[in-house]
Image: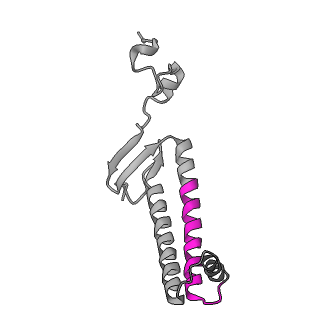
Amino acid sequence: MDDERPDSGRNVDSTGDAVPKADREANAGAEPTGPTEGPGGREVVVPLRLYKTVIVFSTLIAIVTFVGGFVLIDAATLQVSLLRSTVAGVLEGLGITPNADVLTVVLALAGLASIVFGSTVYVYGTRFRAQGMGKSQEDSDEG
C-alpha cells in the first residue's frame, strides 16, 4: 500500500511539494545531488539545468579572463600599445604620473592575475556534473 500523502516524507521533493507517482518511479534509482568524494577528487552532482548554467558561465568567464590577461601582458610588453596609452592617459587625467617601469609591472601582474583567476574558475567549474552522468574512462575500473 503506497502512502500518497505529501507529509509522509518520502513522497515530497526538496521544496516540500508532492511528487507524482510516475516521477517517483522514474527517479527511483536517481543519483543524489550534492558533493561527493570520488577517486578523482571532490565532485558536485547537480541537476542538469544547473550543470549547463555552471559550464556555460565558467567557460565564458575563463575565456574572457584568459584573453584579457594576454591583452594586459601584451600592453605591458609593448610601449606603443593602445591599452597602455589609454591606461596612462586615464592615470594622468587623475593626476597620477606612473613611471614606465611601474606601469609595465602593474600591467604584467594584472595580466597574470587575470589568467590565474580564469584558470581557477574553469577548474572549479569542471568539478560539477549532472545527475546520471557517467564517470570518465580514466576513472572507471574497466581496462
- Choose top left, top right, bottom left or bottom right for residue 79: bottom right
Task: State the colouring used for the structure image.
Answer: one colour
Residue at 47 percent across and 30 percent down: it is 27
Judge by depth and name the residue closer to the eye, 137 or 38.
Answer: 38
Judge by depth and name the residue closer to the eye, 76 or 55.
Answer: 76
Q: Predominant secondary structure in magenta? A: helix
Tell me where residue 24 appears, x and y as whole percent. 48, 24
Tell me where residue 8 appears, x and y as whole percent. 40, 15
* Left or right of residue 17: residue 3: left
Residue 1 colored in magenta in the image: no
All told, the count of numbered labels is 0
Q: Is residue 7 above or below residue 69?
A: above
Residue 63 colored in magenta in the image: yes
The residue positioned farthest toward the front in the image shown: 95
Q: Which residues are magenta?
A: 56-81
Q: Is residue 140 visible?
A: yes
Tell me where residue 86 appears, x and y as whole percent. 66, 79
Q: Is residue 126 visible?
A: no
Judge by depth and name the residue closer to the eye, 90 or 111.
Answer: 90
- Choose top left, top right, bottom left or bottom right for residue 29: top left
- Image quarter where the N terminus lies is top left
Residue at 65 percent across and 83 percent down: it is 85
- Image quarter where the C terminus lies is bottom left
Q: Is residue 13 above or below residue 105?
A: above
